[in-house]
Amino acid sequence: MRVKRYIVDTMPDAMLKIRTDLGSDAVILSTKELKTGGFLGMFQKKKIEVIAAVEKEQASEPAKAQPETIIPAASPVPKRVVPDAYRKSSEAFAESMRQALAGEPTNSSEGNSVASPVPTPSFNPSVPEIPQPTLQHVPFVPEEPAHRVSEYNGLSDGLQQEKLFEELREMKKMMAELSREKEMAALPESLIEIADRLKKQGIQQELLDTWLSEAMGQFPAPELITTVDAKAAMKFQIEQFTQSRIGGGINTSTKIVYVAGPTGVGKTTTIAKLAAEQLFKYKRKVGFITSDTYRISAVEQLRTYASILGVPLEVVQSPGDLQRSLQRLAECDLILMDTAGRNYRNELLVSELQSLLAPLENSETYLVLSFTSKTEDMRTITEHFSKYPLDKVIFTKVDETGSYGALFNLLQEYPLRLSYMTNGQNVPDDLLMPSPDFLANLLLGEILP
């Protein structure tokens, strides 16, 4: 029996080589996927290892047919001889397979291992030779993974380059993670506990590394930092971060406030809270304008708040209506405008707001976001609405979540200032004007919203 081992890219290549070398009667004994080449486990190419075999080649000229002879009945074969014959045959076949898998050099021009023909075991002449079982030729149907080509085959140069850059980025990210883990292991236990809490809050790693580095710099002997000192140092870093990113409330010189945001974040209720604050706390005369005519009962909801607070309400549907409404509300000290909630993924719908956001000198534009939204959704919303001038941000539904890291991430990535936070639906209550101390304690779990 001849056994050969092939390393190929695809099964059709293997079938062609097997038929060429071993003939059409060859059978495939096994197939296995391999990975070759690469660097540090990266950029490896997939190959297929195929082991094929064929029975011992017959003489080139077929033997002439011999007249059938009557063979006398042979004497019974001793039972001890049968297993011995099979054992020798199996040992010979196993030796040939071992040579093929070991890749021992042969005279093959392709460099594949070929086992020597298995010698016929010598038996006692008085005992008839036990015929060896023959391998039947069965067409090989490879499984789906065997048809997979090399990872980069079939890709254009541009796609190959892009895939290479992607793998390089993954490698760089992996090395950065290993370096970060090493640095984290060097931190004192007290800071590690705080870092774990901030990561659970959703603080992005770059911002967290900055805070930890600055906090460590406050202590000449980091190994002696206590839990109280570590929490105080981290609180100081959070307060320093938020100090310049808090915008306070509505400026006294502001004449009109535009409130924009996606659907379902609570813009209308927030506007009612702002109006109540300006009426009762700052004694300013307030007026309402709404362009939210798309949502059912939106106008009626704001009309109800206007009736309770005793403020005028104007409904607009076009820029012309807006100018006339501003003239009718000219006697008001402050005008709060409720814009229609829009699907932030639809560029056309979001761009409709631009026609209603009149660029007045004494105006402010507020973006309303909900803490119950995903962090990535918050980024996308902010990115879409940032195409228009945004001054401040309001976060709603603080009481409906326990994770507040997204707020700090957005303040880090976008030039927004935090103005208000809401922690309920009660009007005029449940409106907060956060301070650096409040935000630090909220993030560190010292207070509840």
Image (spheres, helix red, strand yellow):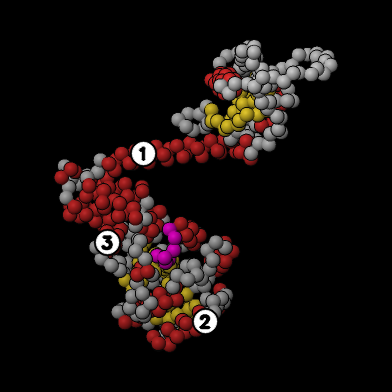
Q: Quadrant of residue 416?
A: bottom left
**In what element is the residue under mark 2?**
loop
Can you say whether 42 is above or below 232 in the image? above
Q: Mark 2 vs mark 1: give the one in front.
A: 1
**Labels 3 and 1 touching (C-beta < 8 A):** no
Q: Please report the bounds of the magenta region as a residue range.
A: 369-375
Query: Mark 1 sits on what residue?
Result: 178
Residue found at x 57% / y 63%: 346
Query: Mark 3 sits on what residue?
Result: 445
Query: Mark 2 sits on what residue?
Result: 297
Q: How far apart are labels 3 and 1 at the CA level?
A: 29 Å
- Asked whether residue 351 is drawn in magenta, I would say no
Residue found at x 44% / y 73%: 267
Q: Quadrant of residue 77?
A: top right
**In what element is the residue under mark 3?**
loop
Q: Tell me where residue 78 appears, x and y as whole percent.
A: 59, 21
- Asked whether 201 or 141 is in front, the reply is 141
Q: How far apart are labels 2 and 1 at the CA level?
A: 55 Å
Q: What's under tag 2, amino acid-wise?
A: Ser
